[in-house]
Amino acid sequence: MFEWFKRLIIAPLPPESALAGASAMDRAGMSAAPQSEAEHAIAQALAGTNTGASPSFAQKEHVDHVWFRWLFDKAEGSTLQMNRAEGVVLDALAAIVNADQSGSDLVRRMPGLIPQVLQSLRCDRFSGTEIARLISGDLVLVAAVVRLANNARQFGAKEIVSVEHAILVIGQEGLRHLITTVAFRPIIDLQSGYYSRRLAPRIWEQAERCAVASRMLAEQSGGTAFDAFLAGLAQHVGLLVALRLMDQASGGPGLGSSMFCARLQQLARQLSCRISREWNFPPAAVLAIAEQETLHRNARPSDMGRLLAQTDYLSKTCILSEQGLLDEADPALFEGLPATALACYNRLHAFDTATTP
């Protein structure tokens, strides 16, 4: 699957002018604008830090704790001990991780239309009419393409309502990126269980932001933008599979203790690595996912492992601050992170999952 994606995916993101400059605020492209309290605190925390640094163990532990509390709608101070249903879920997930059968078989396949569209996009002289015809057969793709095109249109321009017009606005590269992201997006319908309906959209939003952030910052890590983007999208595929087990073991709220979340994250990452290997994803991306459990015990983690730790942290922090669960004016959130993290973090705040691939 990786080789198929590699032939069809967009080229690496060109260097962002916002990431160049002497100071943290210059890198954010905001040096001429007044700083908010949060922006000032972030800039102070990031000033003079190592460009290759990743979040500390304490930083990640704090944000992950708040993240899982939000995912499961748990109040601060909720129970630490696991209940019976949580034990059932973890036992089932461990059995999948250790089984001989393919873990990728548990992931819902991509819609059959998407490979056809991407195949057509391989040609530099692609036919907009033919692409429009193919896309028109999938209402999800139609909606995504039109929304993205309207988001990109110039101020005052007439609203875009046709797929043909949208394709002209987005262009070939934009379509490749959009359709690849749609291919990974989890399928959630009214028949899904409680946890799939509630948690999958939250997990996917974070995965998209993490992938975009990884792509932004890939050049400084020594890896490729494609590998970094793919690692960001794929790192939580095991967690999405686990949601189905959670739906089967529990009919509603009741999961989410601290011990359960810690073990769930560990097993889900192992499953993500296994599925990524079965899909022949690049070794650098698989290693980066695996290293997230051992990053702070490993004296020499890979560059992409550090990058993924940084972008996973930034994307979670961004979403949690938007939910009012973290105060981004707290300098401890960004202490020790590289200066380029500020520009990336600010761009993630502007990221719109409804219109941005």
Image (spheres, rainbow, N blue to C red):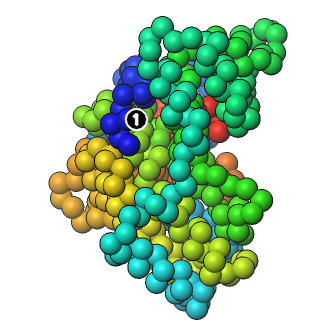
Asked if one can make out residue 178 in the rendered structure from this viewpoint, the answer is yes
Q: Vertical placement of 147 versus 102: above or below?
A: above
Residue at 56% x, 35% y: name it: 114
What residue is shown at x 38% (from left), y 43% (from top)?
1
Seen from the viewer's position, the closer of residues 69 and 268 is 268
Residue 315: x %, y % from top left: 52, 47
Give the total of numbered labels. 1
70 and 236: which one is in front?
Answer: 236
Left/right placement of residue 137 relative to residue 292 reads right
Residue at 77%, 59% in the rendered image: 190
Residue drawn where x is 39% and y is 46% of the image:
231
Q: Is residue 182 left or right of residue 94?
A: right
In the rendering, at what x and y percent does residue 173 appear? Answer: 50, 19
* Disc 1 secondary structure class: helix
Please state the horizontal and vertical placement of residue 69, each as a whole percent of the image: 61, 69
Seen as rendered, the residue at the extreme left is 300
Q: Is residue 148 visible?
A: no
Which quadrant is home to the C terminus? top right
Q: The disc labelled 1 sits on which kind of residue?
A: Phe
Q: Residue furthest bottom?
A: 84
Residue 175 position by quadrant: top right
How many other residues sit within 10 Å of disc 1, few (<14), some (14-19) or many (≥20)?
some
Residue 54 placed where, x, y %? Answer: 34, 50
Q: Which residue is mark 1?
A: 5
Nearer-the-camera pick, 129 or 164: 129
Q: Judge from the rendering whether residue 315 lies leftward or rightward of residue 154; answer left or right.
A: left
Q: Is residue 92 above or below residue 32?
A: below
Residue 280 drawn above or below residue 151? below
| 186 or 68, nearer to the observer | 186
Find residue 192 and report its image quarter: bottom right
